[in-house]
Image (spheres, rainbow, N blue to C red):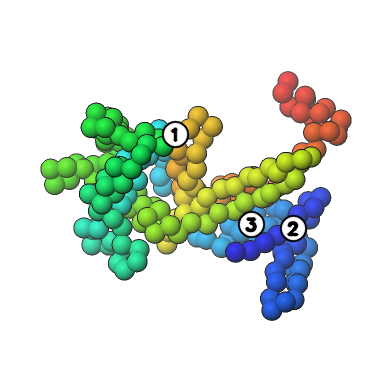
Amino acid sequence: MRDFYLSEGTVVEYARREGDHEFGPRRSEGTLAAELARAVRAADKARLVPLRMSAGDYLVFAVFARDLRSSREAATGADTPMSLDEVLAYFDEPETRVVRTPNDETWQASVEELLRRGVLVAAGGGYALHADFHALAREIVADHQHTVVRFDFLDEQWLFREVSLYPSADAVYRLGSEVDGSVAIEELSSATLVDVIAEVVSSLPNLVDPEVHSALESSSL
């Protein structure tokens, strides 16, 4: 984990080693975004079309993501994904307030929707996750997640922004929820990766400043 302190567009990295407090060189927020983007390897051009799924459809997607054990490229050891039956066993748990446990009808409806959109394909008398999503699925199952988070203290409460990234060998994927409750999956190009990280680490405009209000009003015309 890396920690940074940001003030008035300037960033310094903080670390503590063997009781010593260390501060890195000053850099801009844009430089920080580019630096964090270089920690993973994104493709020059995204190959997957951005995907939006309902919470129920994503639950079905997650089950199929864990059903890769029979694949020749399936992970081994501690990161071995669970089979379909193993994941379905968790549906015996009480329902949450966010996502209801799917019944046969809703499950089939989600399968058909993901099949229509090319996320699932027919295989062996059933269905399987399309090969295009295998790399992402394995990173999700193994919980190989990189999270960039910024905390700001505003008046009497904290505001935090974050983005969850799942890097594979040659691609980086963003996984997150939308305001309507849907789940977004997007492969990021090397350029959009920097933009996405910059949205998190960049300072918000000072809405108390009258010059900011004028700029916002002009942009809305």
User: What's the residue at 13%, 47% (across, down)?
Assistant: 124
Q: Return the x and y of residue 85 as percentages of the image width and height.
A: 22, 49
Comparing labels 3 and 2, the label whose residue is closer to the camera: 2
Residue 172 visible in the snapshot: no
Give how far apart the Cα atoms at labels 1 and 2 are: 36 Å
User: What's the residue at 61%, 59% (across, down)?
Assistant: 36
Residue 214 visible in the snapshot: yes
Find numbered disc 1 in the image and state the secondary structure of the residue it sits on: loop
Asked if the residue at tag 2 contacts the one at tag 1, i.e. Cβ–Cβ closer than 8 Å, the answer is no
- The residue carrying pointer 3 sits among few (fewer than 14), some (14 to 19) or many (20 or more) residues within 10 Å by Cα, namely some
Comparing labels 1 and 3, the label whose residue is closer to the camera: 1
Decide if residue 68 is on the left or right side of residue 180: left
Nearest the viewer among 16 and 28 is 16
Quadrant for residue 59, please give it: top left
Q: Amino acid at mark 2?
A: Tyr
Decide if residue 68 is on the left or right side of residue 186: left
Residue corresponding to mark 3: 34
Q: Earlier in the sequence, mark 1 or mark 3?
A: 3
Decide if residue 49 is on the left or right side of residue 160: left
Identify whether 212 is placed above or below 220. below
Identify whether 49 is placed above or below 36. above
Decide if residue 94 is on the left or right side of residue 185: left
Q: Amino acid at mark 1?
A: Arg
Q: Amino acid at mark 3?
A: Ala
Report the disc number at residue 97. Answer: 1
Comparing labels 1 and 2, the label whose residue is closer to the camera: 1
Give how far apart the Cα atoms at labels 1 and 3 are: 38 Å
Q: Return the x and y of residue 20 as percentages of the image width and height.
A: 74, 76
Give how far apart the Cα atoms at labels 3 and 2 are: 16 Å
Q: Residue furthest front?
A: 94
- The residue carrying pointer 2 sits among few (fewer than 14), some (14 to 19) or many (20 or more) residues within 10 Å by Cα, namely few
